[in-house]
């Protein structure tokens, strides 16, 4: 650049607008079909309306589902990992050639932590 000074070119109006600070950097991902069907079924069963804005954002839809899904009754097995968690951990253990600590089979949060620290990246 032969000594020229860079400046905002006046021939490009609207290049920098006052609204730029309020524009979203990325658009939210809409909920999946399965997620939407489940949320609609929950809304029908509970008699609650499902806001349209929630359907357009996967995270908000997931939060709405968590708030409205039926809670499982507490039992002595409530803290145990699910069969899907155990199966996933066992697949990881086979691939990594590691044993799963015995206490993980009695506590779902321990199993979750073991999975997170051992799953392939």
Image (spheres, grey):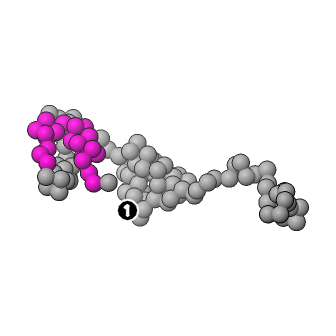
Residue 119 forms part of the magenta stretch: yes
- Return the residue found at the far front: 2
- Count of marks placed on residues: 1
The answer to whether residue 84 is above or below residue 75 is below
Q: Quadrant of the C terminus?
A: bottom left
Q: Which residue is mark 1?
A: 34
Residue 32 forms part of the magenta stretch: no
Give the main secondary structure, helix, strand or loop, of the magenta stretch.
helix
Crowd class of label 1 (few under 14; some 14 to 19; many from 20; radius 10 Å): few
* Residue at image coords 25%, 37%: 109
Secondary structure under badge 1?
helix
Q: Position of residue 75 (x, y in %)?
A: 17, 35
Q: Quadrant of the N terminus?
A: bottom right
* Residue at image coords 46%, 59%: 31
The answer to whether residue 46 is above or below residue 56 is above
* Residue at image coords 70%, 49%: 22
Which one is in front, 45 or 42? 42
Kindly tell me whether residue 47 is visible in this rendering.
Answer: no
Left or right of 44: which side holds 73?
A: left
Q: What residue range appears in magenta?
A: 98-120
Which one is in front, 55 or 95? 95
Q: Which quadrant of the structure image shows residue 25?
A: bottom right
Kindly tell me whether residue 117 is visible in this rendering.
Answer: yes
Q: Position of residue 27 (x, y in %)?
A: 57, 58
Left or right of 12: which side holds 35?
A: left
Q: Position of residue 19 (x, y in %)?
A: 75, 51
Q: Position of residue 91 (x, y in %)?
A: 17, 56
């Amino acid at each position: 650049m032969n000594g020229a000074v860079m400046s905002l070119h006046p021939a490009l109006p609207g290049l920098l607008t006052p609204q730029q600070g309020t524009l979203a950097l990325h658009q939210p991902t809409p909920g999946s079909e399965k997620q939407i069907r489940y949320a609609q079924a929950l809304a029908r069963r509970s008699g609650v309306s499902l806001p349209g804005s929630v359907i357009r954002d996967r995270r908000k839809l997931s939060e709405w589902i968590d708030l409205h899904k039926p809670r499982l009754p507490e039992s002595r097995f409530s803290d145990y990992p699910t069969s899907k968690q155990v199966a996933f951990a066992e697949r990881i253990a086979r691939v990594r050639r590691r044993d799963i600590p015995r206490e993980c089979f009695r506590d779902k949060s321990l199993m979750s932590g073991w999975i997170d620290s051992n799953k392939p990246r």
